[in-house]
Amino acid sequence: MTIDSIEATAIEIPLPRQFSGSVYAMTTRCAIVTRIRTADGLSAEVYNGDNREHGRELVRLITEEIAPLVLGQDAIAYERLWERMFAITLPNRDRKLAMEAIACVDTAVWDLLGKRAGLSVRQLLGGYRSELPIISIGGYYAEGKTLLDLAKEMEGLRLWGMGGCKVKVGGLSPEADAERVKAALDGAGPGFMIAVDANRGWSVPDAIRFARLIEHLPIAWFEEPVRWDDEARGMAAVRRACRIPVNAGQSEYSARGVRRLLDAGAVDIVNFDASEAGGVTEWRRAADACALLDVRMAHHEEPQIAAHMLAAIPHGICVECFADPARDPLWPHLLPDAPRPKDGMLAVPDRPGFGIRLDEAAAAKYAIARATARR
């Protein structure tokens, strides 16, 4: 299964309105489409990551720096391929960006592996279950948005087939955000999972104050509660101070970064992102480390990839998506064959590989950069 060519395309889709968390605002949906073709006629097609300002640079990294290391290599030897690609992270550079580029190629390699075996990636990785709960990322801040609006948003998500929502917090005072969480729970009704995500927005004291205001409520987890500069220690302090499980890992870009959180006793759940941190191969290392310590796994966004990984293992919790098509025009809106959530669950397709078939015309419309490397 010799790798014959690699094509990378950066997509950028303007959003109809701004979506704001505690420390950021989103106005575009971006992704990298990666295609690999082999000498024996197999073809992989995947897309990764909500990358924003650096799509063009990722295309360059994939086709100019990674491609020479993997063209002509056997795709079956995925560990050796990953080791070869990892070499681009060793010089002094933006290593997170390099790991994102590796993730794009590694994910396409796993798509090839599944197609060669006639199995889905879910089956290749363990096949623990065929469906899993799905929640939406939502509860964004918006000018003029009321508590009633937030409650109605949760009602709408349930009607869309969602099993829960990850609500944004950390942008207001702990007291004001606690009221928002209560409104979301009221709108959601029984059996609807509510998690909260501060996106590293609070100091440790404020995060603890917020947690104590809501810990009597049925909250699934408290995600990235504290600011980035001392987060392992800070999250461990939050975890000791309240009963809500702490979730983090999406901001790490290696499995060893996840190990740092585990060693610090900072997390109950890890949402390591394969699209931003070296792909499926590196994600498996993080998932194995978590399994040894009874830490559960989630994933940051990208359900078209994450569903296969999380459904494959016994300690996967749920997959997350953007149910609102205004926030994510890609999934499932540019995926004609994407599975649709139903009653809070998502069935993982068992087409070979990841089973991704993009709407080519729609994807091409939003391409901002494309390059191909051949051997």
Image: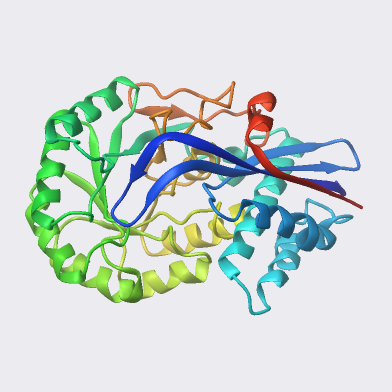
Q: Position of residue 319 (x, y in %)?
A: 42, 40
Q: Residue furthest bottom?
A: 92
Left or right for 180, reference 95: left
Horizontal and vertical percent for residue 136?
A: 35, 36
Relative to 123, residue 275 above or below: below
Q: Nearer the viewer, residue 15 or 330?
A: 15
- The answer to whether any part of residue 190 appears in the image is no
Q: Residue at left 84%, top 53%?
A: 74
Horizontally, residue 318 falls left or right of residue 192, namely: right
Please report the residue visible at 37 percent of the width from the left and 75 percent of the height from the top. 263
Image-based side of 311 in relation to 221, left or right: right
Residue 310 position, x and y percent, is 47, 44
Q: Residue at x 21, y 65 (%)?
A: 239
- Whether residue 240 is visible here, answered yes or no, is yes
Q: Nearer the viewer, residue 103 or 294?
A: 103
Which of these two is toward me, 157 or 142?
142
